[in-house]
Amino acid sequence: MIEKKLDKIQDNFSPLGVGAIPNLFTLLNLFFGCLAIVFALQTESVIIYVNDEFSGSSFNIPEKLTWAAIFIGIAAIIDFLDGFVARLFHATSSIGKQLDSLADVVSFGVAPGVILYQLLRFSFAMEENGLEVSMIWLMPAFVLSCAAAYRLAKFNLDETQSYNFSGLPTPAVSLLIASFPLILHFNAATFGIGNFLINKWVLYGLIVLLSYLMVSNIPFMGMKFKDYSVKNNLPKMILIVVAVISAVFLQWIAVPVIFISYFILSIVNKNKFT
């Protein structure tokens, strides 16, 4: 019996054991999170001058920032798969849980924080002398990164968050933030949403709201199914229907719509998720 337990412990920590398979997925999540940060940092604003006078600044989102957003999306998919693979191979471990949170801090904390930093920079760049904005006005972007790190640390210590969450999950926040460059690049003219998302006060408001929701104890719906009955899973089924319909008709704007739907369904049914 003792030998079996020792073998299991060694397998969880061995880079070649069965326990390493989901950990490799987790490290791949971290890899794409790092790529997202690199691409998000390689962006420039374009100042427009007419007859040597300042005319404005383009906020046409650079392609590299959209790639950063896509890499965050890939990291989120892999983050879902590593848990699935761990259960499939019965290879859950303490080190896997810690590694998952460390990777998530980068992919779903730092990376979206850098995207917010760049969006704030573009917002200020549209103003006269905007490129000379003080770092103080851009630093609030990383409040969201700090809140994500706190949220993940709290999640690691809470054994009750298996099917539902206490506080807004970081992947949901990161996917929302990651959708902004894609919306601004592909759907900015739709409903005038481009001017809304590039507004610095909107961005500041979102940073405060999302950071608070992550560190709060408000119950939020998890997407794991205990069973497949309609009664126990109606909010999740409604969210899936909303996701499919909005994806077909709204393209990247579907992401904020899905997020808002998720928030509303969680608040309305919060008694079920406590």
Image (cartoon, rainbow, N blue to C red):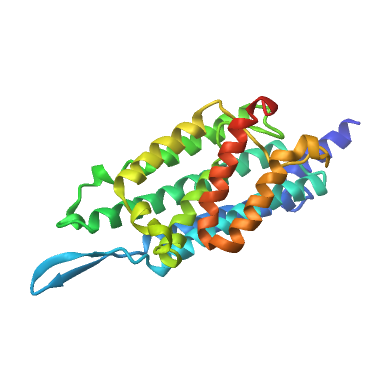
Judged left or right of residue 267, residue 69 is: left
Q: Residue furthest left?
A: 52
Query: Which quadrant would residue 211 be assigned to in this image?
Result: top left
* Residue 255, position as x, y percentages in the image: 54, 53
| Residue 50, visible in the rendered structure | yes
Q: Residue at x 19, y 69 (%)?
A: 48
Residue toward you, 201 or 113: 201
Residue at 40% in and 41% down? 206
Instruction: Return the x and y of residue 262 as percentages of the image width and height.
Output: 59, 42
Position of 25 relative to 227 (above/below): below
The answer to which of 238 and 212 lies nearer the viewer is: 238
**Residue that extends furthest to the front in the rendered view of this protein:** 191
Q: Is residue 43 above or below residue 102?
A: below
Q: Residue drawn 42% across and 58% down?
A: 191
Quick check: 101 left or right of 205?
right
Would residue 45 appear left or right of 194 to someone viewing this image? left
Query: Residue 57, image x and y in percent?
Result: 23, 64
Task: Name the outermost residue toward the right.
Answer: 1
Q: Residue furthest bottom?
A: 51
Decide which of 247, 37 is in the foreground and name it: 247
Q: Residue at x 55, y 58 (%)?
A: 32
Q: Report the number of numbered marks.
A: 0
Q: Quadrant of residue 100?
A: top right
Q: Position of residue 267 (x, y in %)?
A: 58, 31
Q: Is residue 229 left or right of residue 113?
A: right
Q: Quadrant of the N terminus?
A: top right
The quarter of the picture where the C terminus appears is top right
